[in-house]
Amino acid sequence: MQEMIDIYDRDRNHTGITIPREDAFLKEGQYMLYVLALIEDLSGRLLVTQRSLDKHWGAGWWEIPGGGVRSGETTLDALRREVPEEVGLTIADDLEPSPIYSYENVDLKRGDNYIVDFYHVRLDFSEEDVRLVDGEAIAFRLCTWDDICRLNEESTVLHFERIRQALEAEGTLH
């Protein structure tokens, strides 16, 4: 079954266009939505995962959970779907997080225009609660910000600068 996405304008208004994700080559003024989750345990560590080695892009790199927003979803809906799919953790219905940071990417050459919402959620979980999905990630770590900085020096942490900007915007990183 094809994953369908809605196309938005820069102000996040639905354009009325819904297309299969694999057909997405977006023109100027067209955007798809993504969500990224900064998942923090009660000790203040953030969950990062290592991408599968067979990924066509960024194989073996470290990242935070997230993904594309499907047709009919809000970014919060996508957050509630993506986190359990990728790491087996649940964001309770009574938790109503708001995005702490957003940014837009425009790449007209590749038709890769998107808006990303970062959410920061604090959950009561342990390493034993994390369940990685085959084909998505091969490892995970719970990291302090200093650990993530070191990890980025040793390897690559996708969205590293955006993670830093999100935490700074929220006021949790000084």
Image (spheres, grey):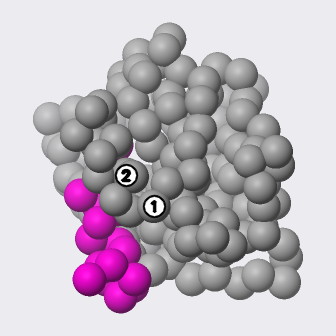
Q: CA distance from mark 1 to mark 2?
A: 6 Å
Question: Which residue is at 74% across, 48% downward?
Answer: 127
Which span of residues is magenta-colored? Answer: 158-174
**Where 48 falls versus 29 (above or below)?**
above
Which mark, residue 144? 1
Question: Which residue is at 52% across, 47% downward?
Answer: 48
Question: Which residue is at 45% across, 80% downward?
Answer: 100
**Residue that carries the numbered disc 2 in the rendered image:** 148
Q: Which quadrant would residue 69 be assigned to in this image?
A: bottom right
Q: Most extreme residue toward the left, as rendered?
A: 109
Q: From the viewer's perspective, tell me whether residue 170 is left or right of residue 153.
A: right
Q: Nearer the viewer, residue 32 or 128?
A: 128
Q: Most extreme residue toward the top, as rendered?
A: 54
| Residue 150: x %, y % from top left | 29, 46
Question: Which residue is at 45% across, 43% downward?
Answer: 63
| Residue 88: x %, y % from top left | 79, 46
